[in-house]
Amino acid sequence: MQRIRAFPLIPSAASSLFSLFSSLVPANTMATEGAIPDGASVQCFGRKKTAVAVTHCKKGRGLIKVNGSPIELVKPEILRYKAFEPILLVGRNRFAEVDMRIRVRGGGKTSQIYAIRQSIAKALVAYFQKYVDEQQKKEIKDILVRYDRTLLVADPRRCEPKKFGGRGARARFQKSYR
């Protein structure tokens, strides 16, 4: 992939810059002007243990907010890159025309991060399927599944409840015969 530098636009040079840009970027990655309606939005959720993240994805300018603050400020810092994984895998250019508003609650910090990353990935796939085109949706889905299947498919494992006769779900108290 080639890097594209941003230059200040001069009205007379705008058409030549657009032709330069369109020659650098493959045709299938460029969105057509006015193809996506203004009210275009998708709602998806991601789950991990008891954490649930709901993402509202709509046409916009590339903003991603988690509980009202930018995704760059997600805590803890160590897990921040887990939340960035779908963005880094698919590429920032696919997120350039969508805004995502994410609400997450329940679970712990790690579970919330995993729920966030899953909801971002699922929302992007659903948005591309509904408003862009099926081929790009398939490309995105293949990239995400090849990296980590849990980006699109929920993990069904839950904590097993404790039973009587022991100190945990399976562990039993020690038994003495004499």
Image (cartoon, rainbow, N blue to C red):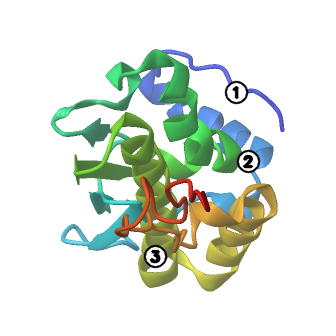
**In the image, residue 52 lies at what x, y percent?**
29, 60
Residue 2 as seen in the image, left or right of residue 129: right
Residue at 45 percent across and 67 percent down: it is 158
> What label sits on residue 48 in the rendered view?
none
**Depicted 98 relative to depicted 85: above or below:** below
> How far apart are labels 1 and 2 at the CA level?
9 Å
Q: Which residue is mark 2?
A: 25
Identify the mark nearer the N-term, 2 or 3: 2
Q: Are marks 1 and 2 in contact (CB under 8 Å)?
A: yes
Residue at 56 percent across and 37 percent down: it is 82
Quarter of the image with the C terminus in it? bottom right
**In the image, residue 50 lies at what x, y percent?**
32, 60
**In the image, residue 9 lies at what x, y percent?**
47, 22
Residue at 78 percent across and 42 percent down: it is 24
Badge 2: few (under 14), some or many (20 or more) residues near its Cα, within 10 Å? some
Q: Quadrant of residue 138?
A: bottom right
Depth check, mark 1 against mark 3: the one in front is 3
Which amino acid does the dot numbered 2 rest on?
Val
> How far apart are labels 2 and 3 at the CA level?
23 Å
Residue at 61 percent across and 41 percent down: it is 85
Which amino acid does the dot numbered 3 rest on?
Ala
Badge 3: few (under 14), some or many (20 or more) residues near its Cα, within 10 Å? some
Quarter of the image with the N terminus in it? top right
- Per the image, label 3 sits on a secondary structure element best described as helix
Which amino acid does the dot numbered 1 rest on?
Ile
Q: Which residue is mark 1?
A: 4
Q: Are marks 1 and 3 in contact (CB under 8 Å)?
A: no
Q: Quadrant of residue 150?
A: bottom right
- Per the image, label 2 sits on a secondary structure element best described as loop
Residue 116 as seen in the image, left or right of residue 56: right
> What label sits on residue 126 in the rendered view?
3
**In the image, residue 127 lies at what x, y percent?**
43, 71
